[in-house]
Amino acid sequence: MESLSPETMKYLSAAICTLPMAAVALGIAKFWSTLLENVGRNPQANKELSGYSMIGFATIEAIGLFSLGVACAILFM
């Protein structure tokens, strides 16, 4: 069996690094659906939930951006 070339391994590693972005997409969808459900149940808590929601959204989104950054670093370095 042939071994894979370094160039092929580089592309394969970058592809594996982008897999967490699928989990990030699912996490963001679940996050916003839960937020809208909670605001629908208790509209008075909208302002309190908005502040916490932006922090949570930024945290979830950062995971996707970090994985994209690692994939780009693998490809271009």
Image (tube, grey):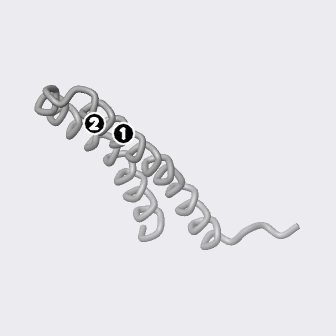
Of residues 3 and 12, the one nearer the viewer is 12
Of residues 74 and 53, the one nearer the viewer is 53
Q: Amino acid at mark 1?
A: Phe
Q: Quadrant of residue 45?
A: top left
Residue 31, labelled with which disc? 1
The percent position of residue 75, horizontal first and vertical second, equals 47, 68
| Residue 48 relative to residue 24: left or right | left
Give me the C-alpha separation between circle 1 and circle 2: 8 Å
Of residues 4 and 15, the one nearer the viewer is 15
The percent position of residue 74, horizontal first and vertical second, equals 47, 62
Q: Residue at x 43, y 48 (%)?
A: 24
Q: Residue at x 63, y 69 (%)?
A: 6
Question: Height in image: 67 above or below 6?
Answer: above
**Local SS, label 1:** helix
Q: Residue at x 29, y 39 (%)?
A: 36
Q: Residue at x 31, y 47 (%)?
A: 62
**Local SS, label 2:** helix
Badge 1 density bin: few <14, some 14–19, many ≥20, Cα 10 Å: some
Disc with the residue nearer the chain's start (1 vs 2): 1
Are the residues tagged 1 and 2 within 8 Å (C-beta)?
A: yes
Residue designated by label 2: 56
